[in-house]
Image (cartoon, rainbow, N blue to C red):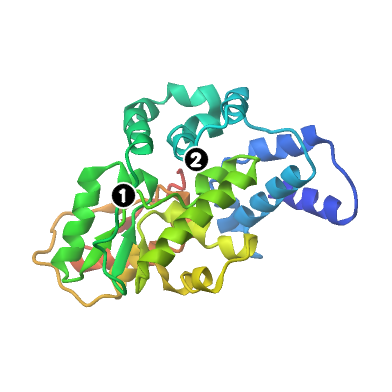
């Protein structure tokens, strides 16, 4: 965090740092947000990272992603196909070592080539659930989410593959792609005219909360932001009782740093207390 602050302070003072020094600072950050959680002054380190990367782009510094990502972008892949190979764009050839990437890549490419989803059956002024990229690829978990909403008597429409929140693009130096993704998603949401937008992915929710700091939007697009909330927050605010309680004991670990940052801890624990007979135990691990 201190390195990012030093870069911004040097920029404000009119100094130009060597690109290699900036790259060294950025590459040391793994995005765990632990420094933000421990900061007594409440500094938003995610916002610092975005600002530094924007400066890198504006000042024409070389791309800090791998040569694989640079090569793929030079081929000017279509927007949807580029999203399908996003792990390659961000992590380069190292991403090919991940079994998860190989497992989801065929579905990513299939989603990129199939026709765009039709949401004409979603009525205006309804509750819509934006699952995010990861959950959209997991039909089992997506089905569980729909079952939960049906069980508490809330009519909600899942808009899978409605677009990308743009959060993955923040790992790249070319912010033009980020703005294009955000505009495409907001255009879809404006057409839907939802009463409320529930975001299931904490990473998406984190990225969406920074959009108004980054760009200017139309009045219709701006009106969407007050209607956006996390799924956990929404479920915790509803009046419902479980059909049966669970008697086993559980230890809770917030494995996702975006969940910790997006204030998702309290609503999640509120939900667990409703369905568990025993108090939950807190994991002391901060590992993501």
Residue drawn where x is 9% and y is 64% of the image? 244
Question: Which is more toward the observer, 180 or 276?
Answer: 180
Measuring from the top left, give residue 169's x and y in whole percent.
Answer: 55, 44
Where does label 1 land, which residue?
Answer: 117
Q: Nearer the viewer, residue 248 or 194?
A: 194
SS category of the residue bearing label 1:
loop
Looking at the image, residue 281 sits to the left or right of residue 218; the answer is left
How far across and how far down the image is residue 55, in percent?
75, 48
Image coordinates of residue 270 in percent, x first then y, are: 30, 68
Q: Is residue 193 left or right of residue 13?
A: left
Quarter placement of the C terminus: top left
Note whether residue 142 is visible.
Answer: yes
Question: In which quarter of the view is residue 138 placed?
Answer: top left
Q: Secondary structure at mark 2?
A: helix
Marks 2/1 in contact by CB < 8 Å: the verdict is: no
- In this picture, is 89 found above or below 281? above
Report the disc number at residue 32: none
In the image, 218: left or right of 270? right
In three-dimensional space, the C-alpha distance between marks 2 and 1, rounded to whole angstroms, equals: 16 Å
Q: Position of residue 40 (x, y in %)?
A: 64, 63
Is residue 276 at all visible to an observer of this figure?
A: no
Q: Check disc 1: other Cα within 10 Å, few if <14, some if 14-19, many if 20+.
A: few
Residue at 29%, 53% in the rendered image? 118
- The structure residue drawn at horizontal position 12% and vertical position 63%, both measured from the top left corner, is 245
- Which residue lies at the image location 63% right of the left edge and 46% below the top edge? 175
Give the residue furthest to the left. Answer: 243
Q: Which residue is mark 2?
A: 79
Q: Residue 269 lies in what quarter of the image? A: bottom left
* Relative vertical location of residue 116 with respect to residue 267 in this rendering, above or below: above
Relative vertical location of residue 264 with respect to residue 234 in this rendering, above or below: above
Dot 2, how many residues are within 10 Å of its Cα: few (below 14), some (14-19), or many (20+)? few
């Amino acid at each position: 965090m201190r390195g990012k602050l030093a870069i911004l302070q040097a920029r404000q003072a009119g100094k130009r740092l060597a690109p290699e020094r900036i790259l060294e600072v950025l590459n040391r950050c793994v995005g765990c947000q632990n420094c933000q959680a421990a900061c007594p002054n409440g500094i938003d380190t995610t916002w610092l990272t975005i600002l530094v990367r924007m400066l890198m782009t504006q000042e024409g510094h070389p791309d800090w992603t791998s040569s694989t990502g640079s090569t793929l972008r030079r081929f000017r892949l279509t927007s949807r196909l580029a999203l399908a190979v996003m792990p390659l764009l961000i992590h380069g050839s190292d991403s090919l070592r991940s079994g998860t990437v190989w497992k989801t890549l065929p579905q990513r490419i299939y989603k990129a080539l199939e026709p765009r989803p039709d949401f004409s059956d979603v009525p205006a002024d309804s509750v819509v659930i934006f699952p995010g990229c990861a959950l959209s690829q997991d039909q089992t978990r997506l089905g569980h989410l729909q079952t939960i909403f049906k069980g508490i008597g809330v009519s909600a429409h899942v808009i899978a593959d409605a677009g990308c929140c743009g959060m993955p693009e923040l790992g790249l130096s070319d912010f033009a792609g980020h703005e294009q993704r955000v505009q495409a998603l907001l255009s879809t949401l404006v057409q839907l005219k939802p009463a409320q937008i529930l975001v299931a992915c904490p990473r998406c929710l984190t990225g969406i909360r920074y959009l108004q700091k980054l760009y200017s939007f139309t009045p219709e697009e701006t009106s969407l932001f007050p209607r956006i909330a996390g799924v956990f927050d929404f479920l915790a605010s509803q009046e419902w009782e479980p059909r049966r309680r669970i008697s086993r004991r559980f230890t809770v670990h917030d494995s996702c740093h975006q969940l910790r940052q997006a204030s998702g801890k309290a609503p999640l624990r509120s939900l667990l207390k409703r369905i568990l007979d025993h108090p939950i135990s807190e994991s002391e691990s901060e590992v993501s």
